[in-house]
Image (cartoon, rainbow, N blue to C red):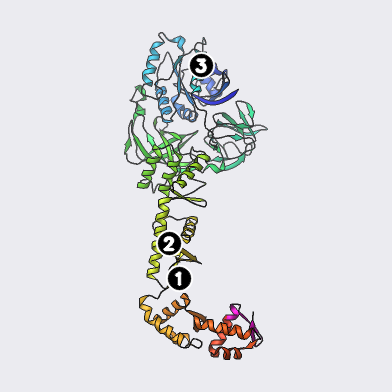
């Protein structure tokens, strides 16, 4: 038989019979704390397992029983973050209540689309149609408007089987939780067992976790290894998404290296964040009874608490274009967290007021690593709009690169709900469309890359025009000039230089130039250059000393150009030869020494120069590896 795993969470007002209903469905009492037993209400999360065979399928359902009391709504939010179906519980004798309304707001904000209403305590109802009618009125206009309503009684067992049938019917049309290869286990319980060590539990999402697998605990970044994996007291080799999972991680210490609110994941799937960009919405439902506080506007720059997964984090909310967010309104916002959190783009979250009394808004993460300096930039606005309106990995990847220009291939969309294959396919699609450029470990937006190359080419050409006597523009100067407009990591700059070298430019040591660029004297040095050329060619093997050749600044600059361009050769600081004269002298020396060694005097006579020139010339040839000195003689190396 095929087994499918799903999670159902209860929702509803305090004392409406949620825990009793869960016990009637599963045989398990989800209230586990002594205080819960004493007070008769659920304080923290409770868990139970329900197996529902149907044909050749077994629906393995983990039920999360959440608190209904207003003092424990924060615990309720921790239980409904990764559920497939909400089980609304409304008592027939009380009807719709304030916490029922708030739970509906929360489920709306979290994007949960499926619900079943269990009308409990039906044995106490005088007319069962009255509470049913009220429930239908309250659900009108919500995503649960057509949710089935099943009257139940745990006293006489009425409706329990019918409720199970409705759960099966609901799950038949539900898609099992996705496996995108990025497992996350938001930790809702941590405890230590003697002889076993630390055990953490949670609802696994987005990927599998196996026995012996290395894991990372975020946001702290502590790494460890899973010893054993369990689900509902049965041991497994691998836990799958959508299952209630217990991991034995003995190397970690409860409340020291791992605690409720942490996330067990893989080291390679991202990093914690302290700033996120998101889209917020305020539920459009009108005020009702004592739940009128739910309609209070969310004000800009307000200090609030962000509920995400099983954690809640103090934060400040910065609205992009609103001074406050009223019922039915939507706004982009930046949440500046007071402690790090581990999130994915696409995650839903809840905002509650600082006192933890009221749910004020909900949102979806659009950008995991926000930048306070760039939040209001036009590029970021366009990015947020694109990401909000798209579910395509290709479109979101393109929008990311249009905004950021460059990104590491190993990091782009990693903290998202897209699988590695979806990201690879998106990259391939954009490369084929010539919208992005692959640069080793980096990816660049195609239009941005073209503009960067054009900017670099313009700056190199400007350098050639301003300094035609220079062999090229120093790479450090090129990067410095580009940095006024572009943020260029070293890898990107190196890739730019390599791309330019394939596109009509050439790099030599620490300089870059157009391949067609020819060195030329600037106009103000033309006269000095002509004078030097004449002096060097008049006596190519016995020219004037350097001091005589270049007695002033202009001729010194011109002489440096002739040396850099190869027209002249610097023999030593005091001696310069015309390039043709130097080549002629070297050829004469090679021929002379090819038959026998010779003294400096013999070489000087053969070349036809002075001792002032031949001595530094031979020393240069020694350094260049053409000749070597043996006693008073020179010979070819």
- Report the number of discs: 3
Q: Quadrant of residue 548?
A: bottom left
Residue 467 position (above or below residue 311): below
User: Few, some or many C-alpha atoms within 10 Å of disc 1 (few <14, some 14-19, many ≥20)?
Assistant: many
Single out the mark in the foreground, 1 or 2. 1
Tell me where residue 108 appears, x and y as whole percent.
41, 28
Residue 387 position (above or below residue 91): below
Task: Tell whether position 315 is magenta.
Answer: no
In the visual, does 353 lie left or right of 507? left
**Residue 354 visible in the snapshot:** no
Q: Residue furthest top?
A: 126
Q: Residue 480 has which mark?
A: 2
Foreground residue, 60 or 121?
Answer: 60
Label located before the other in sequence (2 or 3): 3
Label located before the other in sequence (1 or 3): 3
Verify CB contact (< 8 Å) between mark 2 and mark 3: no
**Residue 213 visible in the snapshot:** yes
What residue does disc 1 label? 471
Q: Residue 551 has which mark?
A: none
What residue does disc 3 label? 165
Tell me where residue 151 appears, x and y as whole percent.
46, 13
- Mark-to-mark CA distance, 2 and 3: 69 Å
- Mark-to-mark CA distance, 1 and 3: 82 Å
Task: Tell whether position 623 is magenta.
Answer: yes
Tell me where residue 369 appears, x and y as whole percent.
45, 44
Single out the mark in the foreground, 1 or 3. 1
- Mark-to-mark CA distance, 1 and 2: 18 Å
Q: Which residues are magenta?
A: 621-637
Picture residue at 46% right of the left edge, 9% below the top? 123
User: Few, some or many C-alpha atoms within 10 Å of disc 3 (few <14, some 14-19, many ≥20)?
Assistant: some
């Amino acid at each position: 038989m095929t087994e499918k795993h799903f999670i159902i969470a209860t929702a509803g007002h305090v004392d409406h019979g949620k825990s009793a209903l869960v016990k009637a469905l599963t045989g398990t009492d989800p209230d586990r704390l002594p205080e819960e037993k004493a007070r008769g209400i659920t304080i923290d999360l409770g868990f139970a397992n329900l197996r529902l065979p149907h044909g050749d399928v077994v629906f393995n359902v983990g039920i999360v029983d959440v608190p209904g009391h207003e003092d424990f709504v924060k615990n309720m939010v921790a239980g409904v973050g990764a559920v497939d179906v909400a089980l609304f519980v409304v008592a027939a004798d009380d009807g719709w209540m304030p916490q029922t309304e708030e739970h509906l707001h929360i489920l709306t904000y979290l994007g949960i689309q499926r619900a079943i209403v269990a009308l409990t305590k039906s044995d106490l109802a005088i007319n069962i149609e009255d509470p049913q009618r009220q429930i239908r009125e309250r659900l009108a206009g919500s995503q649960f408007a057509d949710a089935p309503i099943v009257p139940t009684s745990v006293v006489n067992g009425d409706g329990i089987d019918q409720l199970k049938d409705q759960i099966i019917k609901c799950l038949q049309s539900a898609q099992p939780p996705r496996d995108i290869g990025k497992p996350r286990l938001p930790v809702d319980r941590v405890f230590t067992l003697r002889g076993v060590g630390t055990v953490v539990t949670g609802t696994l999402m987005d990927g599998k976790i196996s026995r012996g697998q290395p894991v990372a605990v975020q946001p702290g970044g502590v790494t460890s290894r899973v010893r054993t994996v369990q689900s509902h007291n049965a041991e497994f080799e691998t836990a799958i998404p959508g299952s209630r999972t217990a991991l034995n991680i003995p190397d970690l210490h409860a409340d020291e290296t791992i605690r409720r609110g942490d996330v067990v994941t893989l080291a390679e799937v991202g990093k914690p964040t302290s700033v996120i960009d998101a889209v917020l919405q305020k539920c459009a439902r009108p005020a009702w009874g004592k739940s009128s506080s739910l309609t209070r506007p969310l004000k800009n720059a307000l200090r609030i608490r962000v509920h995400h997964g099983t954690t809640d984090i103090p934060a400040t909310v910065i609205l992009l274009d609103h001074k406050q967010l009223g019922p039915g309104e939507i706004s982009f916002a930046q949440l500046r967290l007071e402690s790090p959190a581990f999130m994915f783009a696409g995650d839903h979250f809840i905002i509650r007021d600082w006192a933890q009394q009221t749910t004020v808004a909900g949102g979806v993460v659009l950008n995991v690593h926000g930048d306070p300096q760039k939040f209001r930039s036009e590029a970021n606005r366009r990015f947020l709009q694109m990401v909000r309106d798209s579910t395509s990995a290709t479109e979101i990847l393109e929008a990311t690169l249009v905004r950021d220009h460059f990104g590491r291939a190993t990091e782009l969309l990693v903290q998202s709900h897209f699988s590695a294959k979806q990201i690879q396919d998106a990259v391939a699609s954009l490369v084929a469309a010539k919208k992005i450029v692959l640069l080793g470990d980096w990816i660049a937006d195609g239009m941005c890359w073209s503009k960067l190359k054009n900017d670099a080419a313009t700056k190199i050409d400007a350098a050639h025009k301003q300094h035609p006597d220079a062999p090229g523009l120093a790479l450090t100067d090129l990067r410095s000039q580009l940095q006024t407009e572009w943020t260029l990591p070293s890898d990107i700059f190196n890739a730019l230089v390599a791309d330019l070298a394939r596109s009509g430019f050439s790099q030599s040591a620490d300089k870059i130039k157009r391949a067609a660029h020819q060195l030329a004297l600037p106009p103000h040095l033309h006269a000095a250059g002509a004078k030097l050329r004449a002096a060097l060619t008049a006596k190519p093997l016995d020219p004037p000393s350097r001091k005589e050749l270049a007695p002033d600044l202009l001729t010194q600059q011109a002489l440096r150009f002739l040396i850099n361009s190869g027209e002249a050769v610097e023999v030593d600081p005091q001696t310069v030869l015309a390039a043709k004269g130097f080549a002629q002298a070297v050829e004469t020396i090679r021929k002379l020494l090819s038959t026998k060694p010779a003294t400096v005097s013999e070489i000087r006579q053969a070349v036809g120069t002075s001792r002032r020139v031949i001595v530094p010339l031979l020393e240069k040839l020694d350094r260049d590896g053409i000749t070597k000195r043996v006693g008073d003689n020179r010979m070819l190396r």
